[in-house]
Image: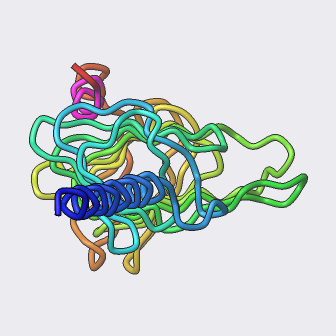
């Protein structure tokens, strides 16, 4: 009888250990994109409450080094920041209470042009994307609720200001467009405002250095 009890206890322990190992393995597996080809970069830095949603899975407060992939939904909480580093050298800093979707990413191969397409659902971001050398026609696109921002290599900030979407260029050239109109931003601290997709972007103006600095602080780490 004692031997039978020991056998049952050993069996239960083995089953429990097996389930634990399986759960840990599953958790490790889901910390990476399902398809390695969908991996587009990693989290470089994070502060506060961060969430990534991917294929029905949710990752709360991922650590630096956590992989990011196509179609990831990145959400930040109050007083939170996250910095994404893409494989093409692009970096995206996301401010608090934001939602960003990595809509698409295409790697550059030789002279084949790549693409980085982001959907900014809410909040502020700063996008720094280098000018490609081998494939100069790379598509860089940031889609917001009010307008679509396109460029080939840029340092820009976009965020909500007074009920409108502001777009500020620190380096490079971009066009800001929607169904109602189009403006070009070319030069340091050149900015525009867009109320919504039914109203054209406003005439570009050069922001004072202090105003530009304060805007960039909305996505900067403390």
Residue in the foreground of this view, choosing between 118 and 178: 118
In percent of the image, x 49 and y 54: which residue is there? 32
Residue in the foreground of this view, choosing between 43 and 56: 56
Q: Is residue 218 magenta?
A: yes
Residue 67 higher or lower than 14, as above or below: above
Pinpoint residue 81: horizontal percent, then vertical percent. Answer: 25, 36
Q: Is residue 99 visible?
A: no
Pinpoint residue 25: horizontal percent, then vertical percent. Answer: 44, 55
Residue in the foreground of this view, choosing between 204 and 15: 15
Q: Is residue 7 left or right of residue 108?
A: left
Residue 174 higher or lower than 43, as above or below: below
In percent of the image, x 58 and y 53: which residue is there? 40
Q: Is residue 159 magenta?
A: no
In percent of the image, x 55 and y 46: which residue is there? 41
Q: Is residue 80 visible?
A: yes
Pinpoint residue 211: horizontal percent, then vertical percent. Answer: 23, 27
Main secondary structure along the magenta-highlighted residues: helix
């Amino acid at each position: 009888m004692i031997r039978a009890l020991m056998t049952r206890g050993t069996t239960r322990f083995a089953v429990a250990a097996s389930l634990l190992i399986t759960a840990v393995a599953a958790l490790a597996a889901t910390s990476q994109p399902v398809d390695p080809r969908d991996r587009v970069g990693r989290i470089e830095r994070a502060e506060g409450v961060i969430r990534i949603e991917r294929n029905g899975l949710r990752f709360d407060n991922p650590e630096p080094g956590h992989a990011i992939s196509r179609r990831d939904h990145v959400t930040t909480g109050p007083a939170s920041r996250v910095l994404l580093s893409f494989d093409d050298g692009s970096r995206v800093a996301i401010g608090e209470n934001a939602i960003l979707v990595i809509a698409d990413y295409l790697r550059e191969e030789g002279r084949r042009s790549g693409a980085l397409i982001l959907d900014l659902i809410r909040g502020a971001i700063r996008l720094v994307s280098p000018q490609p050398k081998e494939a100069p026609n790379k598509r860089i696109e940031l889609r917001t609720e009010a307008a679509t921002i396109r460029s080939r290599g840029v340092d820009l900030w976009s965020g909500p200001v007074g009920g409108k979407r502001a777009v500020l260029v620190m380096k490079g050239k971009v066009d800001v467009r929607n169904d109602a109109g189009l403006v070009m931003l070319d030069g340091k601290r050149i900015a525009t405002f867009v109320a919504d997709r039914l109203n054209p972007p406003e005439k570009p103006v050069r922001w004072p250095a202090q105003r530009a600095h304060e805007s960039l602080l909305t996505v900067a780490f403390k």
